[in-house]
Amino acid sequence: MKTRALMSLTALLGLAGCATTPKPPPDETAPPPAVPAQTEQPQATSPEAAAPARPESVPATPLRQPKPMELVVLARPDTPIVSFRLVFHTGSVDDPKGKEGLTALTARLMAEGGTQKLSASQLLEALYPMAAELDVFVDKEFTAFSGRVHKDFLTRFQDIFTDVLLAPRLDAAELERLRANAISDVENGLRSANDEALGKVALDALIYEGHPYAHFTGGTVQGLKAITLDDVKAHAQRVFTQDRLVIGLAGAVDDALAQALGSRLSALPATGAPRVELPAVPTTAGRTVIIQKPTLSTAVSMGYVSTIRRGDPDFFPVAFAMSNLGEHRQSIGVLFTELREKRGLNYGDYAYAEHFIESPGTTYNRTNIARTQQDLSLWIRPVVPANGVFATRGAVFFLDQMVKEGIPQERFELMRGFLQGYTRLWEQTDQRRLGYAIDGLFYGTPDFLEQYRQAMSKMTPRSVQEALRRRVQPEALNFAFVTEDAQGLAKTLRAGEPKPITYASPKPEELLTQDRSISSSKLPLRPEAIQILPAQQFMEK
């Protein structure tokens, strides 16, 4: 397991020398990528103009489809390491009803359960002396098999890596072992040990209710129990196919390696199941779910299904603004400063213009979790229950303030300078560069991070605020809480009365005045749309 690195802001800004991702070949059949609209427009509406009405639903505009087994190569002669990234356009949306978790369990059995030549234990024994990495991650629409090895062991590793896909052992005993782990991840991990993750998954289930995104990627307890070995074998043939695959290579690679890998992977089924047709998502607002479980704190997640994703002209300014509120563990964020540093409410408070899943060992989002329908979200790392409502109101207060008042010029310049450097850290490894390049094929956003940096250089506080007023609606938020006294919290939320807090030490009068505004502000939730669900029932079936 990699060691989690905690870097200071100074160190983060200092590491800005990574290469940018080269452009993939243009797709002549696809529409041109959206042009970022961060420059001032002559006829732009004023920030005070009324925001457009929110649509009744978010349509499922399909992602772009690369050609079968499209190749992305990022060669680097200065490294002896070779990185592989095989990304399939399949994820938990392909799980059959009643067998939720099938895609994740199938992928894990392929990656960890051994090959026809090697048992699961022999697979580990073969990788260890090479110091090689082999992993898989499954999200809603994508599954990424990743590998990394020194070029001295390339031939041996390539055989093993491709056998994982072409000749997996799919052993019954290994299926039972990995099934037990997956069920434990739901029962003992998600429900019991990780309130933060539970709140985020509960928000997904709430805002995507009735949609293939709604269930936990790892599956449900009863869904996992229903899966058979025959299900796994058939599913591998249905979704891990050539027409769903993008091949990524980086580091010490050449044409011979690319050709050899493509030749081997051509043994995969050419086609399989048709891609799932995702439905539109109703833009419900003000709904609340409270997950009840024994816990000493309250975790809060809030958000809604967004009308934008990468490639939309408003994506960059909205992403910039949400970073201003605060990304993962960034002490520069407004929410982090206001709720943690000034008020001591909790550990961290974060906001995102697209779905966030932490890449292990980093503070950055994973790559290859592209989604047809994205969500805007804010989440509050567990807070003392007595302060849960105030912290929630605080997050909404500062979001609403940013939309209505914009970002002050001095603060704007600070964030622009920070993100110009910080975004370079997002592409500091070959695996991450491959991930962004592959995501760019599906979103139609080649050189995504360089586009972002160029867009930031042209943004102004006014252009960002105009995008916020067009596309960000605090009144559209939905809420997921994880707490012990669910009935008490529901009663407080329904009453909507001021909920002030007290401090153990004196605070400036300016802060206390702002606190009175926060504690008396109304959360954009509907009292009749509050539901309570025991944790033991969540993701059961």
Image (cartoon, grey):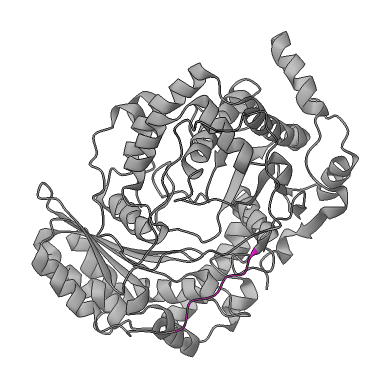
- Residue at image coords 34%, 49%: 2
Q: Nearer the viewer, residue 265 or 61?
A: 61
Q: Quadrant of residue 407?
A: top right
Q: Nearer the viewer, residue 71 or 517?
A: 71
**The C terminus lies in which quarter of the figure?**
bottom right
- Spot occupied by residue 363 in the image (x, y as percentages of width and height): 43, 41
Locate residue 438 relative to residue 132 in the image: left or right. right
- Spot occupied by residue 379 in the image (x, y as percentages of width and height): 62, 42
Q: Confirm whether residue 283 shows in the render.
A: yes
- Spot occupied by residue 432 in the image (x, y as percentages of width and height): 32, 50
Query: Vertically, is 183 above or below 400?
Result: below
Q: Quadrant of residue 506?
A: top right
- Residue 277 colored magenta? yes
Q: In the current view of this chain or complex, which residue is farthest to the front?
A: 43
- Spot occupied by residue 383 in the image (x, y as percentages of width and height): 68, 36
- Residue 534 colored magenta? no
Report the magenta residues as a range: 273-280
